[in-house]
Image (cartoon, rainbow, N blue to C red):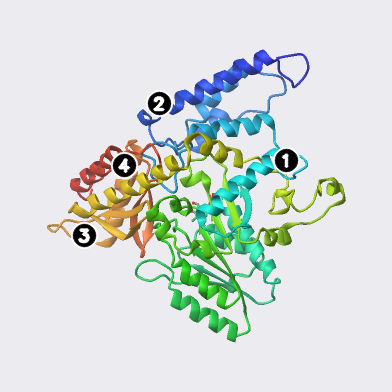
Amino acid sequence: MTARGLDWTPEEMRRLGYAVVDAVVARHSGLASDAPWRGGRRTELETLFREPCPEDPGDPDLALATAVEEILPRAGRIDHPRFMAFIPSSPVWPAILAQWLTTGFNTFQGTWLESAGPSQIELVVLDWFREWMGMPEGAGGLFTSGGSAANLMAVVAAREKAGNPESPAVYISDQAHSSVARGVRIAGIPSEAVRRIPVGSDLRMRADLLARQMEQDVEAGRSPVLVVGNGGATNTGLVDPLAELATISRRHGAWFHVDAAYGGFAVLTPRGRALLEGIQDADSITLDPHKWLFQPYEAGCLLARDPADLESAFRVSAEYLQDTELGMEHVNFGDRGLQLTRSFRALKVWMTLKTHGRRALADAVEEAMVLADHAADRIRKEPLLEILGVPSMSIVCFRARSSRERTVTPEVLDRWNRIIQDQVVEEGTAMISSTLIDGRFALRFCILNHRTTRADVDAVLDRIVELAEAGVP
Ligand SMILES: Cc1ncc(COP(=O)(O)O)c(C=O)c1O
């Protein structure tokens, strides 16, 4: 390192920079032969990493080696082809490179003045998303840290649009992602204003119950502010009847938001487009490119039918920012959401589409759904497995059941399934998570990875069947 304090010589920067590239390429090339998950107990990690803050310079090669060999591997490999837990992510290489570039170029993506080129690219990419969703021209929004931030901002925008009424009502499905309820709470809307509309036997929000609840609330003097539909529920992948929800919301002047953080990019395929029918009628949509658009963390997005609604909700002028006011067409993305200092997230999506093209991404989305269909078909045929709920998009919930010869109590069956899950994860076959469907413990596959193959799905199911056959321990 130089004697110039914090700056490095070009040679040093290159040497370590190339070492980082090598480490990441090695990780990606060896991914499939690695375990999908590795955890660690707090006591073990305290022993390994607890130390006083270094006062003096240390060896950068040693710090890099520790990061690459000791710290980063002790985690889930979310992009492993057999990581099927929660909502995985499998970023493509151009997107990773773009993220490195934006870090290296230290882009400040809060105002047009400070990032004209990047702001234009954000507008362009948002417009691609708008078209994919079928929203009218003029709709737009912003990139966010993720779906939670986008959902929160949608709640705030809806509340402001409604004039922040004294007695609001917000309608969400009982299958809504937790970030929606959290957003409502952060927005200061009291919990008694939240109506959790039950789902039907198909696990989709009951539009008739929504309509009835809204009518009752209006009669009681409440102001319906917001309806949130699922554009692919996290639990099941199921899509609420969006077109109906849009009509009902409009009838009562409520903002209609679709949380499509998980499923939104399924619109790239004819099947997904059909499932998400009605999404184009939303006032706002949450999307998460870091889920099904193969982007590294963090990349979320909020699209609004009228981006002026976002600016009315979030813009607060300040004297020290007066130089940044360059006129309406020069969008200051810091005025559209809760972050002033923002990274340039749109570049990774732009690089991805410029190098792979839309069709390749659409094919990868379709393939994930085909693999989920395959998993569901196999589960239906396996005598010791049963599907729970209704598989949709790329999510399949299921569990092991008892054989005809041997019936066990529901509690034993739940415990048995938990043991199967733990075994599959601990031995490194796959990372799968669990949930509850109608109150019953379920194993859950979420297949989103462009690397996952039919052989991966079969290998995981073969092992689960093997464990199920071994019987209740
Ligand atoms: C439907 C849905 N909405 C919102 C979120 C939250 O998104 P994030 O984790 O990007 O904040 C998720 C995450 O899984 C999700 O599945």
Question: Can I make out residue 6 in this image?
Answer: yes
How far is the residue under mark 4 from the one under mark 3?
A: 20 Å
Mark 1, residue position: 116
Residue 93 position in % (x across, y down):
50, 31
Secondary structure at numbered mark 3 = loop
Give yes or no for contact between labels 4 and 2 (Cβ–Cβ under 8 Å).
no
Mark 2 closeness class: few <14, some 14–19, many ≥20 residues within 10 Å: few
Q: Amino acid at mark 4?
A: Gln
Mark 3, residue position: 408
Mark 1 closeness class: few <14, some 14–19, many ≥20 residues within 10 Å: some
Question: Can I make out residue 69 in this image?
Answer: no
How far is the residue under mark 4 from the one under mark 2?
A: 23 Å
| Residue at the image point whose x is 70% and y is 60% from the top | 308
Residue sitting at the far left: 405
Mark 4, residue position: 423
Q: Amino acid at mark 3?
A: Val
> Which of the two residues, 406 or 285, is positioned nearer the viewer here?
285
Q: Amino acid at mark 2?
A: Gly
Q: Nearer the viewer, mark 4 or mark 3?
A: 4
Q: Amino acid at mark 1?
A: Ala
Please report whichever mark, 1 or 3, sits nearer to the chain's N-terminal start.
1
Would residue 210 be found to the left or right of residue 113 on screen? Answer: left
| Residue at the image point whose x is 56% and y is 30% from the top | 97
Secondary structure at numbered mark 1 = helix
Mark 2, residue position: 30
Secondary structure at numbered mark 2 = loop
| Residue at the image point whose x is 73% and y is 62% from the top | 312
